Image (cartoon, helix red, strand yellow):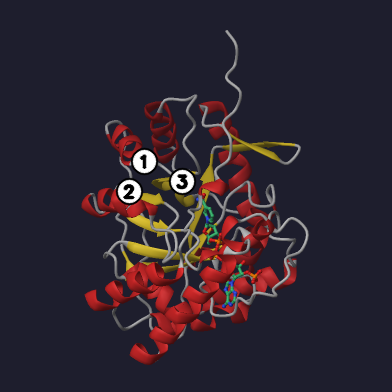
Amino acid sequence: MKRETVKCDEIPLPISRIGLGSWAIGGWMWGGSDEAESIRTIQHAVDIGINLIDTAPVYGFGRSEEIVGKALAAAGRRDKTVLATKVALEWVDRNVYRNSTPERIREEIEDSLRRLRTDRIDLYQVHWPDPLVSIEDVAETLLELKREGKILALGVSNYSPEQMEAWRRVAPLHSTQPPYNIFEREIETDVLPYALEHKLLVLSYGAICRGLLSGNMRSDRKFDGDDLRLSDPKFQQPRFAQYLKAANKLGQYAWENHGKSLLAFAIRWILDRGETMTALWGARKANQLDAAEEAFGWKLSAGDYTEVDKILHETITNPVGPEFMAPPQREPVAV
Ligand code: NAP
């Protein structure tokens, strides 16, 4: 596959601008997952040049990391991969809380290294800011892990520019991971300009808006078990119909103007925002990655961005963001 890559000085490999997101592979909040199919998907991603693999301890409460570790251990794929995981969410009986204390981070790094079957994590990202721990203390802890050789690059996710600024006063920051796709644009006012100005690697999550921008979503699609789309406000009527209509029009625009699928267009729309942009795509079947090739080697014009905005304006009267995914903070400890 023709690839587009981006560089991060701390990481020896060029990083593919499409990353495989492995939240759904963990099963939790996605109605379960199939291990053999998941392993095939991860290996296929690496084999076609998608070397950025993003996971997290909380995805399936260890399961996603375990599956990623198992898939990469086979046939020497680990050294061809830029392995990104996260830290600082804890879970108690499947209830998830933010916890960025140094003790929690120290415990999690060992668990992640073991589950991922590796001796280093290429990109270690703080999953959500924890209001009970100072950003400086979190940054210091990750910097210590880097000095110990356990991690190569330092990243954050769901952080504001102020929080990233506080971080950068005590430690280097190499990446940020915000929600970003054609339908979820909140970061355009603050996080995105900050990240581009400081040349941070941007891992845009939910790149195809949980399938809405895949070109395959239908109004009669049924979601099973704990699938988050059962409660995702975009998937509830009458909004769902509006988002599907917008996706339909965007798909028509992509095909008529570029001869591309909606999925490839949605990925390209993210990548052309800036040189350090990457798109995290949560495929869980190998053939779901078929459109990857189509996303590379062309560009969107300023006119395309204007047309996309026009379509959204005409079709979505009651837009809603990705806030519903934010995990709660811990109860403050009484002193
Ligand atoms: P996404 O990539 O927007 O959507 C994933 C879903 O889209 C899949 O589970 C699949 O659902 C569907 N899909 C994928 N390829 C498809 C295709 N070719 N045709 C039809 N449907 C397709 O959402 P995401 O997984 O939430 O986001 C991507 C990654 O970002 C995650 O895996 C995770 O690594 C990261 N993330 C990070 C955070 C954070 O707080 N840092 C939050 C969310 C996500 P079905 O198979 O069920 O149709």
Q: Which residue is mark 1?
A: 160
Which of these two is toward me, 246 or 186?
246
Q: Which residue is mark 3?
A: 125
Tag 3 and tag 1, C-beta contact below 8 Å: no
Ligand 1 lies under 8 Å from the Cβ of mark 1? no
* Quadrant of the image where one finds ligand 1: bottom right
Question: Which residue occupies 34% across, 69% down?
Answer: 309
Residue 285 image offset from top left, x and y in percent: 64, 75
Q: Quadrant of residue 264?
A: bottom left
Nearest to viewer (mark 3 / mark 1): 1
Q: Quadrant of residue 306?
A: bottom left
Mark 2 to mark 1 CA distance (whole Å)? 6 Å
Mark 3 to mark 2 CA distance (whole Å)? 16 Å
Question: Which residue occupies 36% across, 60% down?
Answer: 12
Ligand 1 lies under 8 Å from the Cβ of mark 3? yes
Quadrant that contains the C terminus: top right
Check disc 1 and give the amino acid type.
Answer: Ser
Check disc 2 and give the amino acid type.
Answer: Val
Tag 2 and tag 1, C-beta contact below 8 Å: yes
In terms of secondary structure, where does tag 3 sit?
strand
Q: Which residue is mark 2?
A: 191
Residue 142 image offset from top left, x and y in percent: 43, 36
Direction from residue 10 to residue 156 in the image, left or right = right
